[in-house]
Structure formats: C-alpha cells, structure tokens
Image (tube, rainbow, N blue to C red):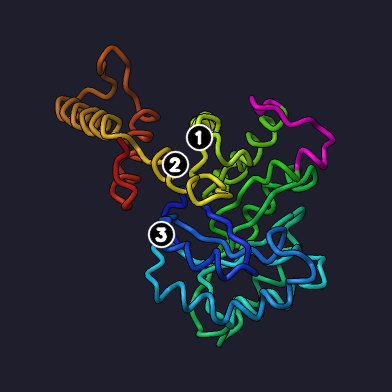
Amino acid sequence: MSAPIRSLLFAPANRPDLLAKLPRFPADCYVLDLEDGTPPEEKARARELLAQTIPSLRSAGLPGMLTVRVNKPDSEHHHADIEAALAADADGLVLPKLEQAGQLISLVNRLRQPGTAVNRQRFVIGGIESVRGVIHAVDVCSCAPEIVAVYFGAEDFIADIGGRRTRAGREAFHARSQVIMAAKAAGIQAIDQAVVDIRDEALFREDSEQGRDLGYDGKICVAPRQAQWANALFSPTAEEIQEAEHMLAAYDEALARGVGTIEFKGRMIDPPLLQRARHVLALAASGSGARA
C-alpha cells in the first residue's frame, strides 16, 4: 500500500445511517471505528454490521481505502474485532494505543496466515497515543512490513501526560516530533493529530500546515468536512509543483555543464532541496494533484 494518506476519516462503526453518507465525502482512507467511536454495549453489534457495511460502501463507490479500527490489544474485544474485519474484507486494520512492538505480533502473524479471509495482502496503521507509545515509537514503526503508517493521537497523549490542551498545541509538539522521526526512520507514512473543534476551519488549517512543515503526510479527520480540508492542505499547490519542475530542470541543465551546486532564484540548490522537489512531484503524480 503506497498510496498517500492525506485524510484518515473516522466514523463510528455502529452507525450505519452515518456510514451510508461517507461516499459523499472523499477521503484517502476511511476508518470504521470499533474502538472509541463505538460504545461498549454496541461493540458486538457493530462487529456484526461490518459484513454488511463494507460491501455496501464499496458498491456505493467509496473513493478511498476502507479500514477498521479494532479495540486495543489488551481489550476483550480485540481478537473478535480482527476476525470480523478480515471476514468483511477490510483493506486494512487500524490498531490503536500501541506502546510496544510486541503488541503487533499476533495481528501480523494472523495476517500472514495462508488463506486469511479472501487471501489478499492487508496493511496495518498503528496508533501512538501515550507516553510509553511515544518512547517506543521507533520499535513500533519498524517492527513489521505490514505497518504502512502510524497516527499520533494527541488527545489520549495529553491525558496520559497530564498536560493541558491549548489552541497553539505547544504541549504536544515534542511528541509530534518524536512520532514523525520514528515514522520517517522506518520509511512509513505519518498521520498527524486530530483537531476536535470540528467547525474551526482556521485552526484545522493552521494545525495542518504546522504538521506538514514537520513532515506529516496527512491528518486525522473526525468530521467529513475535515477530510476535504486535509486533502487540499496535504497536496502541493500548483505554484509548488511549478517551482519543483523548474528547479529540477535548472539543476539537470547545470549537471550537463559539469556544475553540481547552483543558484536558483537567489537560493543555493543542492541535493536536499532537490529531494524535496522530487517529493512534491511524486505527490502530484500519485493522484494528490495540486491544490488551489
């Protein structure tokens, strides 16, 4: 699974009325949530609904990947959630509240069993949401090739650390930095923290721009409108694409003349800047396109 995840849109798995509306809201990856989004007394019913919900959403033309967030590894619901998600043919599984690599082993082994469900490869997205999770993020991110992305769950992290949530988000900056470094060291995608003020588009944009500057690939979305914002904010602009194309063309021309470092629009251009330019073009070519 190499497709970019600009938007990771969560929806409660026990609400078929809400889930039926998802095809109207394009996202790169949808998460049917059996964990926090589903009350304890509804979890069994939500599991049963997956067998109907997932095929129905695909038939309706859901544009993104379809995953299921199972309950945390030490939950009584964990293994039943996994089996229900696999039987319903989810594209991937989202595993929350990871604190050590060992918590992934049983899931990874299950995915590797011959004949698993319809016998196709599935991916895992891990959630890092606690102090222990942040401390062990490198091990979690790099423990198995099935893990293609991790998300940072700031609300749980702040509750765990005993901090106070602020609009500026200073209290989570150190953890966000550790998670992004762990993900990039492992060569996987990183999905940034949620903004729970679902009507505050300005805050969502500000927080997303900060996450993108840090290197995050996408954003947790807890409301459908946020997916639209995230898809745009984590796509390169037309100006960025044009700048990258011109920079690479200028560098290629300089190399042909035997010059390795050049000045481009008042800046000295060397391999790190070229790497970023190639990343912009790769995002544009992947289907992300350009944002206005």
Q: Percent from the top left, x then y, of residue 84?
A: 64, 79
Q: Percent from the top left, x then y, of residue 53?
A: 53, 76
Q: In the image, 123: left or right of 99?
A: left
Q: Viewer-proximal residue, 44 or 103?
A: 44
Residue where numbered disc 1 is placed: 201
Q: Amino acid at mark 2?
A: Trp
Quadrant in the rendering for residue 203: top right
Image quarter in which the N terminus is found? bottom left
Image quarter in which the C terminus is found? top left
Q: Earlier in the sequence, mark 2 or mark 3?
A: 3
Q: Earlier in the sequence, mark 3 or mark 1?
A: 3
Q: Viewer-proximal residue, 286 or 156?
A: 156
| Residue at (68, 66) in percent of width and height | 34
- Mark 3 crowdedness (10 Å alpha carbons): few <14, some 14-19, many ≥20: few
User: Between marks 2 and 1, how big is the CA–CA gap?
Assistant: 8 Å
Q: In the image, 230: left or right of 80?
A: left
Residue where numbered disc 2 is placed: 229
| Residue range corresponding to the magenta coloring | 157-170
Q: Amino acid at mark 1?
A: Glu
Q: Amino acid at mark 3?
A: Arg
Q: Secondary structure at mark 3?
A: helix
Q: Viewer-proximal residue, 23 or 217?
A: 23
Residue where numbered disc 3 is placed: 24
User: Between marks 3 and 1, how big is the CA–CA gap?
Assistant: 19 Å
Q: Is residue 53 above or below residue 99?
A: below
Q: Secondary structure at mark 2?
A: helix
Q: Viewer-proximal residue, 195 or 127?
A: 195
- Mark 1 crowdedness (10 Å alpha carbons): few <14, some 14-19, many ≥20: some
| Residue at (69, 49) in percent of width and height | 128
- Mark 2 crowdedness (10 Å alpha carbons): few <14, some 14-19, many ≥20: some
Q: Earlier in the sequence, mark 2 or mark 1?
A: 1
